[in-house]
Image (cartoon, grey):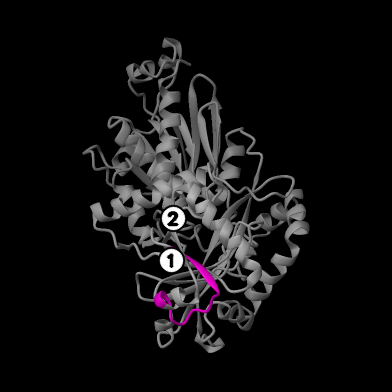
Amino acid sequence: MTAARDDGGRRPATERAHAVGRARSSGRARSSGLSHASARAVAYDCEVVVVGGGLVGLATAHALRAARPGVEVMVLEKEPAPARHQSGRNSGVIHSGVYYRPGSLKARFAVRGAARMVAFCAEHGIPHAVTGKLIVATEERELPRLRELARRAGRNGVPVTELGPDGIAEYEPHVRGIAALRVETTGLADFPAVARRLAASAGEVWCGARVVAVQQRPGVGVAVKLVEHGADGADGADGKGDGNGADGGRGRVLRARMLVNAAGLHADRVARLAGDEPGVRIVPFRGEFHRLRPEAAPLVRGLVYPVPDPAFPFLGVHLTAGLDGEVHLGPNAVLALAREGYDWRTVRPADAAATLAYPGVWRMARRHWRAGALELRRSLSRRAFATAVRRLLPEADDADLLPAPAGVRAQAVLPDGTLADDFRITEGPHAVHVLNAPSPAATACLPIGEEIAARVLRRLDSPA
């Protein structure tokens, strides 16, 4: 197990690991509102344990310690380092909040989060840029949806400018479209660097620690059993192992007053381990990217998006000129055969069987089979993927597309087949569960973390 150093001058996690299971001060337990009997009976290893070392989990720990500097927080991350999944495998875009339903958590947190993320990056010297983006209609039938996006942007407080073909050409000379929205507040950030900076102020971050059991005791707290793994990542993002931690390693139990479940691709499983019914199933969708070969990269100056289908929570194949100088194309979205299935070769039978046994998946498939078939075709055929790119960038040739790393989106699906379209945060007796936090969660991680921290602190301060 590895650990990130705590900025507060407390012992590093490797030293404190020897203290796990030892008695803590009963005075701290009494301050939580627990009874004197409970205080004498329970030895807490920390006040809050956060499961998941992605941006949402780290931002929650950061927010807890900012709001209450003395609070003891432990972040458990099963991988050898933070941000190995959704947080570190995305297009790096700071979203403005144009797309999301007015009044939703996504809309409110994305707008606030975009400004906060830019400020955070500037404060800590993290690479970022506010580039703006174009949302481009290429056909007449897309114009009503583009106008609706403009209205939605206004209601969300996001300024946009409507453009015609000449206006598009001023920003992106090689992009074809009949109308567009220019969104100035969209940008780019090095999200893995953001995660590293958050980890430095998150308390103790224990890597190689997979949660295998959780017990909530109402009025007392939570016990979390974890299995430690080495720092080689053998049970990590490569898709090996069974995904639930029952594959060896040294066991340990941590006791805390509250648990935050920010486990991303495994959030529903952690909720069930804690005895709380999530009401949704996490379905993994792989987002596959290509990149333009260097000779073709000058065809794209900034960020160019198609007009999205409002019935589908994916934004379609878009063009992203990144901070690294490369132009990424994508993603498409296909059902992954493992929770961490970053390619077709990665198949985890238990994951695939659980996904296919869920009635919501089949109801979703009946509802979206046409869109799913197109996504699958683009996954299996570079020519089909290039055709989608040429809707926006006619000069792109099949040979201009090179492979790029994929990501996996943790999409919550309801039993009726509905794709959850907003962030979903629920609570148990001593737990807060983040059950749906795909894009724009990276953008919005700071306000999401503050929302979760506020819920946790209210629970810590309330009588048992």
Residue 19 image offset from top left, x and y in percent: 34, 33
| Disc number placed over residue 96 in the picture, else none | 2
Span shown in magenta: 170-182
Q: CA distance from mark 1 to mark 2?
A: 9 Å
Residue 175 image offset from top left, x and y in percent: 49, 79
Which residue is at a point 49% across and 58% down the rendered structure image?
236
Secondary structure beneath disc 2? loop
Q: Is residue 457 left or right of residue 386?
A: left
The image quarter in which residue 10 lies:
top left
- Give the residue type that dot 1 points to: Lys
Task: Categorize mark 1 by other alpha carbons within 10 Å: few (<14), some (14-19), many (20+).
Answer: many
Task: Categorize mark 2 by other alpha carbons within 10 Å: few (<14), some (14-19), many (20+).
Answer: many
Q: Is residue 174 magenta?
A: yes
The vertical placement of 41 against 164, above or below, is: above
Q: Is residue 156 magenta?
A: no
Q: Nearer the viewer, residue 358 or 347?
A: 358
Number of numbered tags placed on the structure image: 2
| Disc number placed over residue 14 in the picture, else none | none
Which residue is at a point 35% across and 69% down the rendered structure image?
323
Query: Can you see residue 75?
Result: no
Q: Nearer the viewer, residue 239 or 389?
A: 389
The vertical placement of 257 against 40, above or below, is: below
Q: Nearer the viewer, residue 463 or 223?
A: 463
- Give the residue type that dot 2 points to: Ser
Looking at the image, the residue that sits furthest to the top is: 36
Q: Nearer the viewer, residue 393 or 442?
A: 393
The image quarter in which residue 172 lies:
bottom left
Residue 47 image offset from top left, x and y in percent: 39, 29
Instruction: State the residue position of label 1.
Output: 133
> Residues at badges 1 and 2 in contact (C-beta under 8 Å)?
yes
